[in-house]
Image (tube, rainbow, N blue to C red):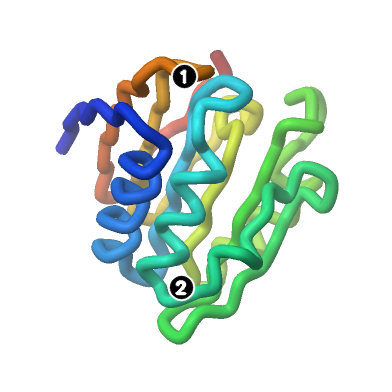
Amino acid sequence: MSKTIKTTTPDDTFDLGERLGASLTGGDVLLLYGGLGAGKTLLTKGILNALEFDVDEVTSPSFTLVNLYKTATFDVYHIDLWRLDGGGDVATAVGLEEILENENAVTIIEWADRLGELQFLNNTIKVTIDGDGDEPRRVSIEQKMRNIYVKKI
């Protein structure tokens, strides 16, 4: 399943995150792609708002690499790979294997292109956000129901 949505304001991006969040089930992995300032963290805030988590507590884990948010429904792991260069084993650096063992958790990975080539056994949603600054965003959402490979681009 694949679709593309145009968002013209930050509120539109947040609202799209809410719609995504409302559709999540335990074990889902969201792979977020997009440039600096594209709206990946804003989308994540919308997702967590749908899961009834205080969005004021949601921050980009650029320096901590992983933030854990305990919602009423799921544990949500928010991972940011911006500071990792893609060399070595990025997945090991953030403890991804252990995180994905939690079948009742949702995992959101910003800068997913830095993972290299991995096979996910979880339901995976690839979200690509194109655009920056004040321009509208084109958000492509592709859902795979298991066994997708992520290749470094």
Closer to the camera in the image, 143 or 122: 143
Q: What element carries label 2?
A: loop
Residue at image mark 2: 103
Where is residue 133 drawn, in percent x and y?
A: 53, 18
Residue displayed at 51% across by 24% down:
34
Mark 2 belongs to which amino acid? Answer: Glu
Q: Decide: is 48 above or below 146.
A: below
Closer to the camera in the image, 86 or 13: 13
Between the residue at mark 2 and the residue at mark 1, the CA separation in whole angstroms equals 38 Å
Q: Which residue is situated farthest in the bottom direction here?
A: 72
Crowd around label 1: few <14 · some 14–19 · many ≥20 (10 Å): few
Crowd around label 2: few <14 · some 14–19 · many ≥20 (10 Å): some
Query: Which quadrant would the N terminus be assigned to in this image?
Result: top left
- Left of 111 or right of it: where is 51? left
Classify residue 68 by image quadrant: bottom right
Where is residue 146 drawn, in percent x and y?
A: 31, 49
Mark 2 against mark 1, which lies toward the viewer?
Answer: 1
Is tag 2's residue or tag 1's residue first in the polypeptide sequence? 2
Q: Residue 73 carries which label?
A: none
Could you tell me if the residues under marks 2 and 1 are in contact, i.e. CB atoms within 8 Å?
A: no
Mark 1 belongs to which amino acid? Answer: Asp
Where is residue 55 drawn, in percent x and y?
A: 54, 64
Residue at image mark 1: 134
Classify residue 37 by image quadrant: top right
Residue displayed at 68% across by 43% down:
80
Query: Which quadrant would the C terminus be assigned to in this image?
Result: top right
Closer to the camera in the image, 149 or 78: 78
